[in-house]
């Protein structure tokens, strides 16, 4: 059978989708990771925002537009949150949650709704898809932060870490098939060994893999200390830190139940730059959170300017039913005001992004070439600059390039 596994949302979803693809391939199916004509569609959904849930539902229609006789299976955060929104959609055979996605891949004859309780221990049933240029390796699941705007702890469960040796075994299995590995999880910062925070221990152990470069997915500022940075410095880790912020205003951070102040965040940024002078520091910012005043937004804007982020992912706040923020007695920011704040921050982001790229003009970086787009070969440098290379180079190879200028959503580069 032709089966398309379609992924919405985070890198953890991507890892779990790829594991399902591997299981399906081992059963003899022809498997795709993009929207195309197929006999079966598996949709791994997202519920981080209302818009993400809407897109998850919409994906069912998009699949059936290609094959109206196809069978559709749904899993992930949106179905964990509300299975009923999928149960009555045309051609949907079965709805799963987050706890048993791999069961879906192994039981395509099942029908109905199969939402299980979220586990208390790490479900070590997934494994990375070994034929990709970049592989994702999941080291942790769940979250204990309970930010007031977020549903994820309720949809993914409490934080739980993968066995240290299991991670190393998976990395070892990938060492001859991929050039780059991203360590991912719902809250990577909370990775623990025997109940103690241990991200630095894991990073230190991975320093023995010299032919693979590693990345970390999103981090909380509190995990970044001298021990972690020393471990990163001696390892083949890429100097890109996606350091979650959400707001650059202390009063908003307090309403969000974020457990730091802006001065703590700024200290972390300075510490990173002490070890990695030219690190790419990117972040997420929510605009228009409940009760956000004009003054509070201005404080966030000025803070982002002060930090000099390389890139900002900007999200207009949307109320999520079931969150603490939904019940908080603060005013809702008008949609037009949210849009204006988003546009203002996007304009700042464009300037900051351009400034960061221009720092590397005529400097040499190492790019992992991933694809050919039109006349350009495209890939990412170690510090996560998207590079467009006109010279003919090999896909899935590292090449040394010199940055010439900002170009499209990255930089134009030439081989050296």
Image (tube, rainbow, N blue to C red):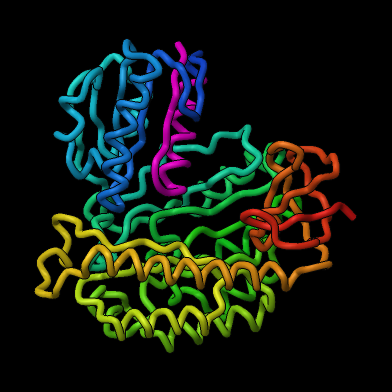
Residue plotted at (50% across, 69% down): 347
Residue plotted at (33% across, 64% down): 339
Q: Which residues are magenta?
A: 1-25
Residue situated furthest bottom in the rendering: 263
Q: Does the image show residue 26?
A: yes
Residue situated furthest right in the rendering: 416
Please tell me whether the stretch drawn in magenta is mainly helix, strand or loop.
Answer: helix
The answer to if 9 sits in the magenta stretch is: yes
Identify whether 120 is placed above or below 15: below
227 sits left or right of 75 in the view = right
Q: Position of residue 123 (x, y in %)?
A: 36, 43
Identify whether 74 is placed above or below 172: above
Q: Position of residue 32 (x, y in %)?
A: 51, 24
The answer to if 263 sits in the magenta stretch is: no
Quarter containing the C terminus? bottom right
Report the front residue among 294 and 75: 294
Q: Does the image show residue 200?
A: no
Residue plotted at (43% across, 86% down): 264
Report the front residue among 236 and 278: 278
Quarter containing the N terminus? top left
Report the front residue among 8 and 112: 8
17 sits left or right of 201 in the view = left
Residue plotted at (20% across, 76% down): 291
Q: Quadrant of residue 311?
A: bottom right
Q: Quadrant of residue 287?
A: bottom left
Q: Position of residue 308 (x, y in %)?
A: 56, 78
In this rendering, the count of numbered labels is: 0
289 sits left or right of 326 in the view = right
Q: Position of residue 253 (x, y in %)?
A: 30, 78
Report the front residue among 49 and 173: 49
């Amino acid at each position: 059978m032709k089966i398309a596994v379609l992924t919405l949302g985070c890198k953890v979803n991507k890892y779990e989708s790829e594991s399902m693809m591997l299981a399906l391939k081992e059963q003899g199916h022809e498997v795709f990771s993009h929207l195309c004509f197929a006999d079966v569609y598996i949709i791994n959904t997202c519920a981080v925002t209302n818009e993400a849930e809407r897109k998850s539902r919409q994906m069912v229609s998009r699949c059936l537009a290609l094959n109206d006789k196809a069978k559709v299976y749904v899993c992930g955060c949106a179905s964990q949150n509300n299975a009923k929104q999928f149960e009555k959609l045309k051609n949907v055979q079965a709805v799963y949650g987050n706890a048993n996605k791999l069961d879906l891949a192994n039981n395509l004859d099942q029908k109905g709704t199969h939402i299980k309780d979220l586990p208390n221990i790490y479900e070590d049933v997934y494994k990375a898809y070994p034929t990709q240029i970049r592989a994702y390796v999941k080291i942790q699941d769940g979250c204990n932060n309970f930010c007031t705007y977020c549903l994820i702890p309720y949809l993914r469960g409490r934080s739980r870490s993968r066995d240290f040796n299991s991670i190393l075994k998976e990395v070892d299995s990938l060492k001859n098939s991929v050039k780059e590995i991203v360590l991912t999880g719902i809250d990577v910062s909370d990775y623990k060994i025997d109940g103690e925070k241990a991200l630095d221990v894991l990073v230190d152990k991975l320093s023995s893999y010299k032919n693979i470069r590693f990345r970390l997915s999103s981090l909380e500022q509190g995990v970044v200390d001298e021990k972690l940075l020393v471990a990163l410095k001696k390892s083949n880790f890429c100097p890109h830190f996606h350091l979650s912020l959400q707001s650059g205003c202390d009063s908003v951070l307090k309403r969000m139940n974020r457990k730091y102040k802006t001065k703590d965040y700024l200290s972390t940024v300075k510490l990173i730059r002490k070890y990695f002078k030219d690190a790419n520091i990117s972040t997420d910012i929510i605009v228009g959170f409940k009760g956000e005043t004009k003054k509070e937004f201005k404080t966030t804007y000025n803070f982002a300017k002060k930090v000099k982020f390389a890139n900002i992912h900007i999200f207009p706040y949307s109320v999520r039913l079931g969150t603490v923020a939904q019940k908080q007695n603060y005013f809702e920011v008008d949609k037009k005001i949210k849009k204006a704040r988003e546009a203002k921050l996007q304009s700042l982001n464009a300037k900051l992004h351009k400034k960061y790229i221009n720092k590397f003009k005529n400097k040499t970086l190492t790019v992992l070439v991933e694809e050919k787009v039109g006349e350009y070969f495209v890939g990412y440098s170690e510090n996560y600059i998207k590079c467009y290379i006109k010279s003919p180079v090999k896909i899935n190879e590292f090449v040394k390039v010199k940055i010439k200028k900002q170009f499209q959503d990255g930089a134009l580069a030439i081989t050296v």
